[in-house]
Amino acid sequence: MAKIKFILFLFLFLSIHSIAQQNRIAIINLTTRNAESNNGNLFSIEHLIKVSGIPYFITDSVTFATRSKFIICSSNIEPTSFTPNEKDSLISFVQNGGTLFVTQLKDTALFPLFGISDYQYATNKYEYHWQVDSADLAFRWINDPLEKWIRLADSSFVNSLNTRSYMTAGAYSLATFDDASTALTKNYFGAGQSYVLGINWRDIVLRNQTMNHYEAARSYSNCFEPGTDVFMLFLKGLYAKLHPYTTWKHTSGLNSRSSLIITHDVDATSAIKDIMNDFASYERSNNFKATYFITTHYMHDSLAKNFWTGYTQDLINVKNKGHEIASHSVSHVPDFYDPSIAPEGTCGNTELTYQPFYNGTFSSNVTACGETEVSKLLLDRDVGADVRSFRAGYLAYNKKILNTLETNQYDFNSSSSANEVLTAFPFQGHLDLSMNGAVSSIYEIPNTISDVFMSDPISESNYNNKVAQWLDALKRNADNYAASVLLIHPNRLYKIQAEQNLIRSLANNVRIIPFEHYGDYWKAREKCEFDQVMENDSTLKIIIKNTSLPLHHDMSFVVDNGMDLHQIKVVNENNDPIQMMQEQWENNSKILFSERFSENYTSYYYNPDGPATVFNNYPNPFSTQTIFSFELMQDAKVVMKIYDVSGRLIEEPINEELELGLYEYTYTNTQLADGLYFYTITINEEKPVIKKLIVSSQP
């Protein structure tokens, strides 16, 4: 009997596994078949599918791939990429209802399958235009004007990407290059569909991530730039079109639509000494955490004086308010990107042996290893921070930075603009910032919006206009469920006002999380594996791999058309239930999550017009107790004294350093007789505020 049960269980397991494979995207790895020098194409298409959150598998076998309903090839289709039998298998696969997506098709034997007759090779295509058909659900997320066309290269380059334009012979054109030639085709063949894209995967993903593109970014910062992301959005839309109950891993977490990640670059005395803790207190008063990237500038040079020595307590105060502390280098020199000035160097440095210097024109004694190693050493040792993230000064991206971040055991890097890498989503960097470099363990989380504007810099008179730009980019990212990273220097009080105005204008479904929290979520998301099977016409089962358990707290899933289902179950591989909340998501979908996101970030209002509001106490008159209420607009020393009518000091109830925020102080009368008194409150030794205080035992 036990043997029979085991056989039945094995049969059921294999049946579910077979059905689950049908619902995964199959990526055929052609790296070896095409004798490619690296796996850049495979990395790139896998990255797009990872970001989409859809289950997939990679295989070298055409036979194994055809178990899926949707196949994507990693690389060019050369005449020798497939054997004749494999070509027949792919033709049968599509004819019987499968979907096949390839790039750079050169094999004429497969032209009829894709509905094309010829192609034209070129290296001078500069734009890519989607021929968006609103009736085609594959375009469901290609709906922003900046998504409907992207730049592939700046027109100043005579030669740029290798592309192929296709002459259709029954296929439809879904996208064109700037000369109106066909860049993407779709062909109906039998019961299935086939697609050809005239660009390599690595040229639209890896090239952008390593900043080896041909100046394809339309702007540097503070603008929506989905040059890579649109291809993920199309593939995700195409898959969802083919699978009515598509389940995908959410890119924001919980039931939020998007995430805002607030980061600060502390790289000047005016920040670390005067204003940084005002930002930290304001943020804590609104119950969210930010990430402070600290420059440990312990030398005097032409860039700045020493603003490290003597300021560690200020940094400890920020950490004690619950914020993350990260490294923003040691020297913060503008030519850090130049390997001839800042080579990789060797590790084993301390602040005594590592002495970088900037003379106003160029730097000396600067190394990538020294910057990452010593800054981490100081912040760990003197501030008690667990430093896991790095950001280069000026975002001057050194080609050896990932190498040294790995050596010094970092997890995250934030040294690139989202516009410069043409994506809003995190990705694993490549060592040496090279398309041929090994995949790094370091995740890059690009910066989306910042207080640095190339023209018309942010100021006290125009910051509201800049906030409007931030909100525009943030909303466009949120439409793709992407996070937005804000980089703001805490060196001017009006920037607290700008940050506040941004936060008060956020949609209710955007949450604020710290940088490393988001990074940890993203890493856990990528490692989470699941399958989906329909138990019957109205019940969907989502099976989480045991190796992915326990799930990260923020992990959530979206089920397209989930409202049409009678039941959605989440289980592990042993069929044990995993409890998740479920609610409607957008139109007809459902989102599955562990905890409802409900933070409110508008509880505390910062007003920079004065150090404090008018002080009040209530009740007044009072007999035994009264409450003094006041609001500090910056961290300050507060002294409150009570005097009788003759001016004699009676009591000093408050004398302490307080943080920015709202305060209510309950005063219990133990020695004041009925009568008139005065109390004063002094902020940072400024002119005291004087108010009346009346004690009366009569009701």
Image (cartoon, grey):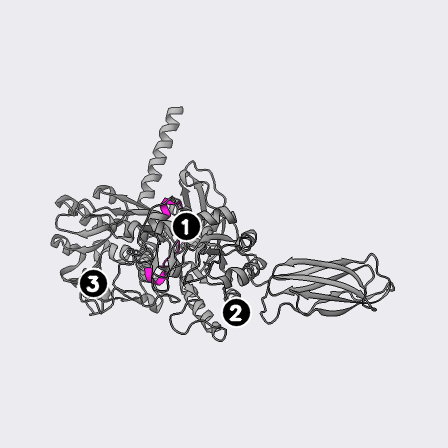
Question: Where residue 549 sits: x, y (%)?
Answer: 44, 40
Going by the numbered disc 2, the residue's amino acid type is Tyr
Q: Nearer the viewer, residue 323 or 48?
A: 323
* Circle on res. 522: 1
Q: Nearer the viewer, residue 603 or 71?
A: 603
Determine if the magenta segment contains residue 418.
yes
Question: Where residue 529 sits: x, y (%)?
Answer: 38, 44
Q: CA distance from mark 1 to mark 2?
A: 33 Å
Crowding at mark 3 (Cα within 10 Å: few <14, some 14-19, many 20+):
some
Q: CA distance from mark 3 to mark 2?
A: 44 Å
Going by the numbered disc 3, the residue's amino acid type is Ser
Q: Nearer the viewer, residue 230 or 337?
A: 337
Compared to 648, does 567 lie above or below?
Answer: above
Whichever of labels 1 and 2 marks the residue nearer the N terminus, that label is 2
Which quarter of the picture shows residue 424?
bottom left
Determine if the magenta segment contains residue 491.
no
Q: Nearer the viewer, residue 590 or 424?
A: 424
Whichever of labels 1 and 3 marks the residue nearer the N terminus, that label is 3
Residue at mark 2? 494
Q: Provide the secondary structure element on which disc 2 rests.
A: helix
Check if mark 1's residue and mark 2's residue have beta carbons within 8 Å.
Answer: no
* Circle on res. 57: none
- Mark 1 or 2, closer to the camera: 2
Which quarter of the picture shows residue 117?
bottom left
Please report the bounds of the magenta region as a residue range: 405-424
Question: Where residue 565 sits: x, y (%)?
Answer: 43, 51
* Circle on res. 160: 3
Question: Where residue 325 sits: x, y (%)?
Answer: 48, 52
Q: Residue at x 32, y 53 (%)?
A: 48
